[in-house]
Each structure stands twice: as C-alpha cells, then as structure tokens.
Image: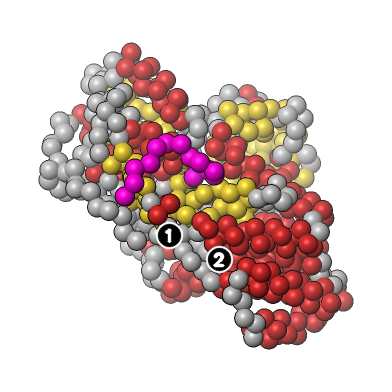
C-alpha cells in the first residue's frame, strides 16, 4: 500500500459525521503496537436496549405523523443498536428520502436554482453527478440502479406537500397514481447501460411528468439527481449552493452569522451552544436558552433548516430575536450578524495542579486545528503540564488531513490510518514522523457522538499504546467522503470514496473505538461554555479521566 503525503489534490477529503445532509476491502494489517491487551474497566452499566419490533413501531408512528426529522434520528439511533437489521435500514432509507425533499424545498438557494436552471442544464448537471459517482464512489452501482433510485425519490417527492405546492397543479393531483404506474412501465423495460442511457431515461421521465402532471422538467431531473446520490449511503448527497458554502465554512472554521448552534424542539428552538465571543454571546444569549421568534416569525414547529434560513443574512445586518432563558420569560434581543471564528480547540486549562494534569476540548478537525492545538499545547506546557486529557466528546470529525496532523503530534512513528477504496488511487497509508512529537502522557475522552476523524485519533492512540481511552464506545463511522464541486449552479456532491482502518488494521464502521475505561454516566453539560468553571466532580467522565491520568500507566 502506498504512503500518502499530506497534500489533498483535486477535492476536499472529509471524515466527519454530517447528519442527514448532516459516513465500508480490508486494509493491509500492521503489527499491533500493544505489548499486551488491557482489559476494559467499566464504571457503571447502561440499561437494556429496546427490541427491533418496538423500535420499528415507534418509528412508524413518527412516519405516519410526517415527523421526518425525528423519525430519521430515531432510526439512526436504532441502527447503532442493530447495525445489521435490514428492516431498520429500509425504514431509515425511506425516511431519509422524505426528509431530503422537505429540506431541499426549505432551502432558498435550491429554490433559486430551480427557477434559474433550464431543462438542458439540469440534464447536464445530472450527467456530471453520474460521472463523479462512476469515478470516485467506493462502490460500483449500475446505471440502471441509479435511475431506479431516482424514480423512487421522485415518487416520494410526489407525496410531499412542499414539492406538490411548488410543482404540481391542484387539478393534476388526482392522476398521480396512474402516472406512477405509467412511469414504472415505461422505464422498467429500458436497457440502461451507460450514462447517456441514464440521461435519456431521465429526460423521458421528465417529459412524461410535464405532459401528464404539468411538473416542470427541471424539478423532475433534480429529484432523479438527488435520488442517485442519497441512495448510495447515508453520507453521500447532492449539495445545494447554501449547503456547499456551509461545508466550506466548517472546513475554514468561520462563517457569517450569530454564532449559535440550534436544535428544533417542541416549543421552538433550543440553543445548544453559543460560541464564545460571538454576536449572540455578546448580547447575553446562552446555551439552554430558547428562541421563540425570529423577526416576528414564531419558531414553533419550525425545522432547524427553516430556522437557519430565517437567521441567515449579510454581515452587518440585524436580526430581532425573542428569547427565553431558564426563567421562561421572553425578552427581545437585537443581534448584528458578523463573521464568527469557530475555535476547534477550547477549554484549555489545568484541571489538577498537584499532578500537573492538563485538559483541552477538541471540538472538530478543521483547517485551523493544527495551529490551534500547537498554541494550546505550548500554553499548557508553560503552566506545568505533566499529562494531558484530550476531550473528543461530541466531536463529529472533519478534515482527514487535520486528523492525521493531530495524531502525528503525539505518535512518534508507525501507521496513523489506512484508507481503502474501489481503486488503487484511494488506497493510502498515512504514517507518523518523529520530529516535533509531544511525549506527554495522554488520556482521551470519547462518547457515542465522537465520530470519524475523532475515531481516527482515538484509534491511533489506542493501537500505539500511547494513552488511555475513557468514556463510551464511539459512533462507528469508518468512511471517507470527498467534496466535489460541480460546474453548474455553484453546487457540489459529497461521495463516500473509501473506508478507513486503524494502525492495527481494525475497521471503525459500526464498531467504533472501545474505551479502556467505560463510563456510562450523564454526558457533558448543555452549556459548553460552563465547562471552564467545572471541577472534575461536576463531570463524571472528566473525573474518570483525571483518575486515569493520576494512575501510572501500565505497558500495553
């Protein structure tokens, strides 16, 4: 297997869990770096899991009520318990199609694209996506399968209110069932053996939809396009202009906005995090607050995407928020949007001065992470650091190259991670270098939301016997995604291009990283900013990490 330098070539390679937008060949096995196997220590035991039948029943209730976002989260959690259960996978895939339609039609950039894109341009865009799949996707779906996935997606769209409201005249809705049968008969007998055959089939479907239902052909082609990408796996997707811009903002570590992370809840929007120094925090908005209205529009029953649309705006513009804190009393706040820098390393501190135990939180892996980590390490070194706790809880991943660079700071030599794809061009081995290695003893905190690039770091530390892993089994996402810009519409496509493996050749997908010390306790506080003032006694996982740092390490 070839060794790869850290330059990235023609597209951006991500290892991150990007839910809903927002992922599995064995690698050459390297000799294990462990001298012996350390048994996992469990602090407490979690409760039993629900049965598959119960999980399916609850999911179907959410589907009947068209609560697609909640249903998708439900099935995702269920698949973490039963990753090989086909019935759960089918419901997850079906729900993802429904959710995707609503999400696209709540996206103003997608609506603008629909208005501007001609039928011929839409077909050209479809072919571009097919060729990207053919060249880069980790699997090898057939052209006919991709068209069939598109037909499935289009049929789902024909049942979604958002699609119908924009594209289907009221008088034509009674003929949708007859159209579905005609479309299936028409495409079922076609031979589709090339991308040009696929293009012709989609063109035929769009023409028939326009003739029978009055649906604009561009809208049909884009549903076939999204169906082709979304059906590949849960991490591959077509990216609208705003979604592509958001991916780039995450990579760069900055964006224009208010500096808050939101979650849709029953009575509005919950602020999960207010970034330090952001416009929102400077106006007194805190994690745990609820946003009740945006510019006079109630947030009740809004999805997170719909709320994000309301909150978007140019730098310097002002948004009026109605916010309620712990006292549930509404207050009105004016917040001016500006560029916000998102730190990937924060909460840098000494948590035990007697033993010199340092702590930092690694929130994600972005372009600035290596620089941010260097600054933090030297700061802690000057403060007397003798051992270091790196907190990866809730870290969804990020740039593959950033994960490799961070591991390289703590591992002196050997394999960091290996990737394996469909072709040899995706097969690489990333290796450590001795120069600049920090030899400080490590404890790594992980939980069930530590994913992808975070798992690369934790897995490398584990396999090299470089530190103690504390917490909960990690998410188990073992694939690499490439972000490929498209030449039409300022859009892009995210495709799974490879699977990755630990230094010892272990897979991560559906397996994750098992901690050496398992702690099944409450997760981090809702207010991330409050961790600056926490003692280990306030955070059970951190307390376990401090105990691990205080104990002399046994050789492995």
Is residue 266 in view? no
* Image vertical order of residue 445 relative to residue 512, above or below: above
Near mark 1 (Cα within 10 A), the count class, few <14, some 14-19 or many ≥20, is some
* Image vertical order of residue 423 relative to residue 211, above or below: above
Q: Which span is picked out in magenta?
A: 1-13
Is residue 405 in view? yes
Left or right: 72 as drawn, with respect to 539? right
Element type where label 2 sits in the image = loop
Residue picked out by circle 2? 231
Left or right: 5 as drawn, with respect to 257? left
Residue picked out by circle 1? 422
State the quadrant of the C terminus: top left
On the image, the x and y values in percent for residue 541 come to: 32, 39
Q: Residue at x 34, y 43 (%)?
A: 3
Q: Residue at x 31, y 38 (%)?
A: 431
Left or right: 379 as drawn, with respect to 552? right
Q: Quadrant of residue 476?
A: bottom left
């Amino acid at each position: 297997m070839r060794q790869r330098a850290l330059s990235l070539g023609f597209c951006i390679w991500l290892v991150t869990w990007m839910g809903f937008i927002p992922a599995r060949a064995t690698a050459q096995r390297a000799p294990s770096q462990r001298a012996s196997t350390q048994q996992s220590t469990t602090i407490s035991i979690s409760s039993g899991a629900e049965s598959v039948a119960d999980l399916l029943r609850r999911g179907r209730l959410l589907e009947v009520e068209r609560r697609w976002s909640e249903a998708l989260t439900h099935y995702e959690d269920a698949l973490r318990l039963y990753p090989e259960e086909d019935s759960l996978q089918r419901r997850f895939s079906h729900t993802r199609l429904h959710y995707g339609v609503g999400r696209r039609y709540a996206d103003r950039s997608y609506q603008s694209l629909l208005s501007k894109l001609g039928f011929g341009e839409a077909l050209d865009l479809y072919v571009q996506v097919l060729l990207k799949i053919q060249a880069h996707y980790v699997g090898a779906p057939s052209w006919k399968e991709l068209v069939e996935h598109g037909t499935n997606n289009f049929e789902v769209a024909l049942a979604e209110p958002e699609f119908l409201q924009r594209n289907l005249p009221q008088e034509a809705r009674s003929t949708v069932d007859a159209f579905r049968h005609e479309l299936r008969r028409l495409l079922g007998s076609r031979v589709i053996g090339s991308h040009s055959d696929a293009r012709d089939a989609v063109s035929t479907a769009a023409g028939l939809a326009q003739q029978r239902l009055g649906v604009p052909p561009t809208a049909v082609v884009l549903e076939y396009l999204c169906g082709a990408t979304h059906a590949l796996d849960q991490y591959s997707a077509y990216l609208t202009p705003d979604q592509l811009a958001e991916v780039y903002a995450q990579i760069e570590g900055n964006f224009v906005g208010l500096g808050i992370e939101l979650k849709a809840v029953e009575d509005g929007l919950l602020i999960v995090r207010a970034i330090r120094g952001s416009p929102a925090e400077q106006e007194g908005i805190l994690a745990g607050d609820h946003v009740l209205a945006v510019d006079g529009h109630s947030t009740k029953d809004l999805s997170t995407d719909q709320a994000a649309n309301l909150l978007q705006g140019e730098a310097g513009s002002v948004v009026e928020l109605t916010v309620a804190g712990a006292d549930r009393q509404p207050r009105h706040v004016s917040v001016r949007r500006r560029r916000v820098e998102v730190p990937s390393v924060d909460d840098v501190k000494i948590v035990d001065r007697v033993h010199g135990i340092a702590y930092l939180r690694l929130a994600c892996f972005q372009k600035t992470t290596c620089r941010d980590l260097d600054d933090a390490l030297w700061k802690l070194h000057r403060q007397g650091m003798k051992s270091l706790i790196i907190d990866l809880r809730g870290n969804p991943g990020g740039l593959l190259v950033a994960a490799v660079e961070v591991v390289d700071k703590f591992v002196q030599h050997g394999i960091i991670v290996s990737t394996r794809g469909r072709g040899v061009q995706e097969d690489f081995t990333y290796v450590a270098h001795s120069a600049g290695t920090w030899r400080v003893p490590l404890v790594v905190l992980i939980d069930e939301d530590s994913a992808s690039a975070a798992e690369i770091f934790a897995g490398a530390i584990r396999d090299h016997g470089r530190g103690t892993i504390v917490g909960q089994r990690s998410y188990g996402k073992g694939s690499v995604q490439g972000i490929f810009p498209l030449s039409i519409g300022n859009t892009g496509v995210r495709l799974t291009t490879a699977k990755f493996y630990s230094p010892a050749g272990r897979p991560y997908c559906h397996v994750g990283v098992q901690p050496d010390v398992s702690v099944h306790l409450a997760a981090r506080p809702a207010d991330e900013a409050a961790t600056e003032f926490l003692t280990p006694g306030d955070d059970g996982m951190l307390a376990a990490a401090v105990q691990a740092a205080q104990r002399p390490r046994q050789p492995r």
